[in-house]
Image (cartoon, rainbow, N blue to C red):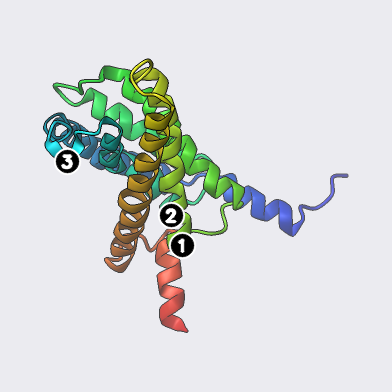
Amino acid sequence: MSAAPTTHDTAVSRLVRYRTIDLVTIATLAVALGVTFWAWGKAYAGLNGIAVFSYPPSVGLLGGPWLLAGVMGGLIIRRPGAALATEVAAAAVSGLVPGGTEWGMSVLVSGFWQGLGAEVVVAILLYRRFGLPVAMLMGAAAGAIESVYEWFAFYDGVFDTGDRLAHLGFFALSGAVVAGAGGWLLTQALARAGVLDSFGPGRDLLARHEV
């Protein structure tokens, strides 16, 4: 006779089991943010040539918008793999938009590393904390990992050690502010609009109003 499931077993099962609405939301975020990634890629081609980015590693400051999907997917879905899946799916959409990106489908590799950075933070916290500091850590980690990937993919033999560290710092800063704080604010705005009532951010907002 098998033992009855414990409270811990039930909680773990509930955490890892995806609902249909979770999958639909990942797909919706991926389309919306994937198109945004594509548009930002077009803008990036002009922005990275202006004088303020004459120090090449500083282009890392432009990376934050590409990290939004992993942060928002993790904050909203709150299940293992959600941040990674949302970022990879959004990267795929950006590559499939007519005209694509200048990086082709290599954006899938970037999406994987970016999503992994955000995912690792919420995994370390056992998918229990989703406040602003956690969101900023997710964005910073996503930016840091993407920066290391780009050292070898795009800047091998171009950046010296100092340039690499500066690029990492700029990318992580942009990730923390634009994707982390920005993604958290967007998630809170969606919760206030009532579209996240079936998700953690919506339930958190309702609980605060009931206190």
Alpha-carbon distance for marks 2 and 1?
6 Å
Q: CA distance from mark 2 to mark 3?
A: 27 Å
Q: CA distance from mark 3 to mark 1?
A: 32 Å
Q: Position of residue 91 (x, y in %)?
A: 32, 30
- Residue at the top extreme? 157
- Which of 137 and 156 lies nearest the eye of the viewer? 156
Establish if 163 lies above or below 73: above
Whether 101 is drawn above or below 168: the answer is above
| Mark 1 nearby-residue class (10 Å; few <14, some 14–19, many ≥20) | few
Residue 169, picture quadrant: top left
Residue at x-position 68% and y-position 54%: 10
Tag 1 residue: 131
Secondary structure of the residue carrying numbered label 2: helix
Residue type at numbered disc 3: Val
The amino acid type found where label 2 is placed reads Ala
Query: Residue 47 versus residue 118: which sits nearer the camera?
Result: 47
> Label for residue 135?
2
Give the labeled residue for mark 3.
Answer: 52
Q: Nearer the viewer, mark 2 or mark 3?
A: 3
The residue drawn where x is 34% and y is 20% is 155
